[in-house]
Amino acid sequence: MQKILVIKLRHHGDVLLTTALYHALHDQFPGVQVDTLIYKETTPLLQNNPHLNRVLCIDRKLKGFARLKAELGLIFQVRRTSYDAVVHLTDQWIGALIARFSNAPVRVQMAYAKRDKALWHACFTHRVVPPPRGQAHAVELNLLCLQALGINPRSLRGEMVLRPSPENLDKADKLLAQHKVNGPFVLIHPAARWPFKCWEDDKFADVVVHLLNQGLHVVLTCSPDPVEVAMTAEIERLARTKRSPGSNQLVNVGGQMSLPLLAALLKLSKFYVGVDSAPMHMAAALNVPQVALFGPSWVQEWRPWSDKATVIYAGDFGPLPHPDSINTDDTTRLLAAIPTEVVIQSVDKLVD
């Protein structure tokens, strides 16, 4: 194998989890050129990745003729590259068509029940059937596709890669100095893309206050999404109300940074506390200790890929809906059953 294209058209965390596959391909085929095709908004998580030759993108902001023109150009670009193998890890038709027209002799698909159609199968030469949901991690599922390339995935460790640049590490240092964070700090990212994955603000504020009482600084972060910014601001307000003497140790930089800068902050932190979201996977990739709160997700599949992670599952404290029945528009916070005391006990182990 000289040239391999990996297609992963999903969210930020999904793309980061795929870095273990890039790493494995690089190790198993010395000198191989590994390219990847992802959505444009997820590219920051692949900056400085040593196992990638080229990152191709689909820009979802393009519409109509502009989108069609860009994707046709991408199809021809892939075909001209003459890949030896194309591995399609998701269920988007554009990825299947790109695989088909790549003319690669090996075209691998992960089996999806909703794509069990003749036209879909015609796009590929190999079909990898995953185990039942909940029996394997996403990293293991990605590595499973290597079977089609003659590699036993069970022999692979699966190491994710996230490398903050020296420039972003310097920016993170300056940001911390600007906010007078001059000692060990805990990074808390309380929000997620979907509210049903979130814990209650008051409980997060109690954890913040507990950490402040231990003499630690706490840095709150979130994406620029207005809902997440408001949630993080409310947690800050509640924490300051509960413990005003320690308010100078609490910093809220929610909505103010890029993903590469967030990665640098995570790298510098003592540990991380958050929910099932991309920063959780970033902490795992950086080998940062963490406490991760989970709700109605497939925990075995999406837990942090790290032996330094403590996972607290809401289903251990109360009933949860089945992961496949979730309405992503539901704003109910389904982690509410997790007791504050359990989270505090877990963070105390990392404080020590």
Image (cartoon, grey):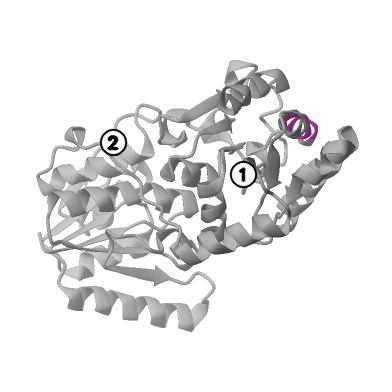
Is residue 150 shown above or below 311? below
Q: Position of residue 85 (x, y in %)?
A: 16, 60
Residues packed near mark 1 inside 10 Å, few (<14), some (14 to 19) or many (20 plus): few
Q: Is residue 186 magenta?
A: no
Residue sitting at x 66%, y 29%: 335
Disc 1 residue type? Thr
**Callout 2 amino acid:** Pro
The residue pinned by badge 2 equals 130
Instruction: Identify the element where label 2 is drawn.
Output: loop
Above-or-below relation of 249 to 307 = below
In the image, 101: left or right of 284? left
Callout 2 environment at 10 Å: few (<14), some (14 to 19), or many (20+)? some
Position in image of residue 151 (x %, y %): 12, 42
Q: Earlier in the sequence, mark 2 or mark 1?
A: 2
Where in the figure is residue 311, as x and y percent of width and height? 52, 27
Q: Find the magenta span and give its range.
A: 202-207
Could you tell me which quadrant the N terminus lies in?
Answer: bottom left
Q: Quadrant of residue 152?
A: top left
Whether residue 330 appears in this view of the structure is no
Q: Quadrant of residue 173?
A: bottom right
- Residue at 29%, 65% in the rendered image: 97
Q: Is residue 204 magenta?
A: yes
Q: Quadrant of the C terminus?
A: top right
Residue with the mark numbered 1:
328
Tell me the SS state at disc 1: loop
Residue 208 visible in the picture: yes
Q: Disc 2 and disc 1: Cα gap in Å?
A: 24 Å
